[in-house]
Image (cartoon, rainbow, N blue to C red):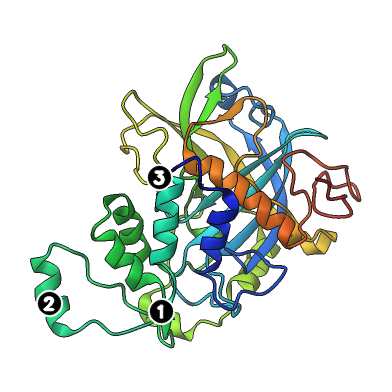
Amino acid sequence: MQQDITAAQMLDAFKEDAPGHLADTRWAHTHGLGVMGHFVASEVARDFCSAGHFQGQSVPVTARFSNGSSDPQRHDERPDTRGLAVKFHVTESIDHDLLSMTMNVFGARTREEFLGVSKAFVPKPVQEESWFRRTILDPLMLRNPLPPMPPGVTISGGPGLAQYAGSHDFARAFTIEGGLLQVPVSWARTAYHAVHTFMAVGPDGVRRPVRFSWQPIDGVFPVPADQQASKATDFLTPEMRARLAKAPARFTLKMAIGDPGDALDDPSMTWPVTRQTVSMGTLFIEQFAQDRGVDVDRLSFNPMRLPPGIEASDDPILHARGEIYQLGCKERGGIGCPLHAAPAANGVRTTARNAEVSE
């Protein structure tokens, strides 16, 4: 069954979760902000990974902050899964895309489970949970109460997913984390997790299972719940412009190294916090991409775009996401859809502008 499910079927299932989606935009993380900067590896990074951007030199990056929703209307003021996609321009012909989000687990382990989660998450009219179910039945059945809905939300996939997770353990952590999402005061004040396991190849040829995450140097800070309603629906972009006018936004790239027995092909499970973690370097976000004439909204980010020194694990969802992102990119007319680099454009080695989309 697993091999019979195609990426096209998975993308079609996901489309059912995105009513009102705007043509020529991303099916997920529709609203975002393109930025540019550079990455500098730590002194110890080269000891654990032979990839070019971990050898100590400054490497240019193109990145995109985003909200997870596919809602055609932007809602920065609502709890949501935020994303950070970073494209390291390792060489003139090699990029590394690292996609991460504010949740540290994924909701499925296989293609078949992905279809089940997508079906459960199809938005439906919201019905407020009764007092009896919330206070009596939910505790009695050892299940989580339905997630609270933000003001003005009348249709959501959250309740359906919560009900689905009640009988499918692999979706439970994902659902619980979703219910705990907050609104960050800034895209630069929240942590992001790459979720999947990769194999980092050391200079000695040793392959280590690793998971990456971004930690904001200024710390994690959410908007207090009683202040969310007063925030503008697009407050995160002007906040970032004001922030970058003062200093770069900085993140530390953390790389956790797995131990024997850790889940290497299951993104629905976290690793213990006791795992050895290496600080691989610092990301400096310095300017808006649009100020350099780079249209990041058209740019392709793909978790399977990997450089020499970093390899994909056997995680079925990682491989499926690579296929799905490529299909979605071609469908919306994005640039750099294939998993190879494109020519330089206006002095910026990205696949973002004036690059030819090839099959």
Q: Residue furthest top?
A: 204
Q: Residue tagged by mark 2?
A: 135
- Which sits in the foreground, 342 or 191? 342
Secondary-structure class at tag 2 = helix
The residue beneath circle 1 is 124
Among numbered discs 2 and 3, the one appearing first in the sequence: 3
Residue density around tag 2, few if under 14, some if 14–19, many if 20 or more, within 10 Å: few
At 29% from the left edge and 59% from the top edge, which residue is drawn?
165
Location of residue 324 in the rendering, given as x and y in whole percent from the top left corner: 60, 51
Q: Position of residue 347 (x, y in %)?
A: 89, 46
Residue sitting at x 77%, y 48%? 336
| Residue 119 rendering spot, x and y as whole percentages | 42, 64
Mark 2 → mark 3, Cα distance in angstroms: 32 Å
Between the residue at mark 3 and the residue at mark 1, the CA separation in whole angstroms equals 25 Å
The image's mark for residue 17 is none
Which callout, 2 or 1, points to the residue nearer the camera? Answer: 1
Asked whether residue 124 is in view, the answer is yes
Where is the C terminus found, in terms of image quarters?
Answer: top right
Helix, strand or loop for disc 3: loop
Residue picked out by circle 3:
109
Q: Few, some or many C-alpha atoms within 10 Å of disc 3 (few <14, some 14-19, many ≥20)?
A: some
Task: Please give left or right for residue 189 compared with residue 134 in the image.
Answer: right
Percent position of residue 84, x then y: 58, 54
Q: Residue at x 64, y 46 (%)?
A: 302
- Identified at 54% across, 74% down, the residue is 76
Residue 131, image quadrant: bottom left
Q: Which amino acid type corresponds to the residue marked 1 in the rendered image?
A: Lys
Name the foreground residue: 31 vs 226: 31
Q: Amino acid at mark 3?
A: Arg
- Kind of residue indicated by mark 2: Thr
Q: Secondary structure at mark 1?
A: strand
